[in-house]
Amino acid sequence: MLLRAVVALCIFNDPFAKPAFILPVQVSEAKHHSEYAVMVKGCLKWTVIMRITVWNEYVHERHNPAVAEIYPDGIHGAVAGLLGEGVANAQVQTATLDAPEHGLTADVLDNTDVLFWWAHLAHHKVADEVVERVHQRVMQGMGLVVMHSAHLSKIFCKLMGTTCNLRWREADDRELVWTVNPGHPIAAGVAQPIELATHEMYGEYFDIPAPDELVFISSYSGGEVFRSGCCFFRGKGRVFYFSPGHETYPVFADANIKQVLCNAARWVYQPQTSSIVTDTSPESPTGWFQ
Ligand code: ZN
């Protein structure tokens, strides 16, 4: 109560100012909701924190020195860093394949609002029960951002229901990422086009369902095109697939790519979800809602 009284005396000129720190006090006890006390410009206030978990298989970085040089803290470290800098009120943690339950225990997922996923070599090593757990959280409303070669991850394929195969080439193509939906929040503040001087080519046909919202299409110096930024609604959750992010290029250091990923976190994030029951098919006698 004392803290709330302090908050009442504070006036915030910038509601989007990044907190100086987040107090380890979770105000709300509700599951899948995260209201914390934060300190902004010397004042305490209550706010809802976006709890982000960045998951990475973390294989290339430990076995390929060239990748380790680009991502000394792992791709998960780079992505967590850019999200921590670019997303206000975010609390970012990481998880990797080798941790017990791949770092995605029920408790971790219950306390995750937005999950980022990078993978390439070890899709088959991800336990089906963990995939099922992630899938259930997406159905409940957790946001999911799937990056680059994670197009073949078990979770993405399960959510899509298709093979998710595509055409590819590692030949230092120039990639241009074109915004095709300028009113979309994920395109906000992003250059038209984003130019990646060298990157892996991902081309059509990309075997996914038609995206619910298409934000980006990439073109390559080899002539191919690719639906590189795709939004999907699954259950109560939002899913965004973004193709840039090959491990041998410093893609996650690019300012526009950082902007897209921060925008994506904000778009898939839903602090509150519908109360509509979706995990059962309730028998409903006439007049049940009156
Ligand atoms: Zn790749």
Image (cartoon, rainbow, N blue to C red):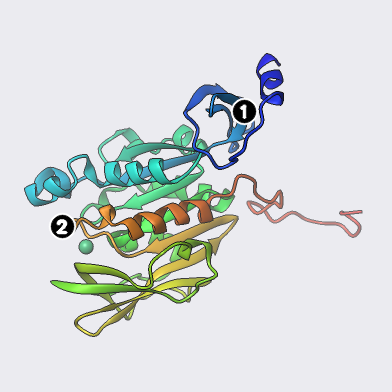
Task: Tell me the number on the disc at residue 248.
Answer: 2
Q: Position of residue 257 (x, y in %)?
A: 34, 59
Looking at the image, tell me whether mark 2 or mark 1 is earlier in sequence order.
1
Classify mark 1 as within 8 Å of ligand 1 or not, answering yes or no.
Answer: no
Total residue callouts: 2
Please identify the quadrant where the N terminus is shown. Answer: top right
Q: Is mark 2 within 8 Å of ligand 1?
A: yes
Q: Which amino acid does label 1 sit on?
A: Lys
Q: Which one is closest to the eye, mark 2 or mark 1?
A: 1
Q: Do the residues labelled 2 and 1 touch (CB within 8 Å)?
A: no
In the rendered structure, which amino acid carries the disc numbered 2?
Thr
Residue furthest to the bottom: 223
In depth, the one of 150 and 135 nearer the eye is 150
Horizontal side, residue 97 vs residue 70: left or right: right
Find the residue positioned furthest to the top.
2
Q: Is mark 1 on a helix, strand or loop?
A: strand
| Label 2 Cα neighbours within 10 Å, binned few <14 / some 14-19 / many ≥20 | many
Q: Where is residue 4 in the image (x, y as percent from the top left)?
A: 69, 21
Which residue is tagged 1? 45
Query: 95 and 221: which one is in front?
Result: 221
Q: x, y (%) of residue 8?
A: 71, 25
Residue placed at 17% from the left, 74% from the top? 173
Tell me: residue 16, above or below residue 189. Answer: above
The image quadrant of residue 227 is bottom left
Distance from Cα at disc 2 to Cα at disc 1: 42 Å
User: Tag 2's secondary structure?
Assistant: loop
Residue at the front extreme of this rendering: 13
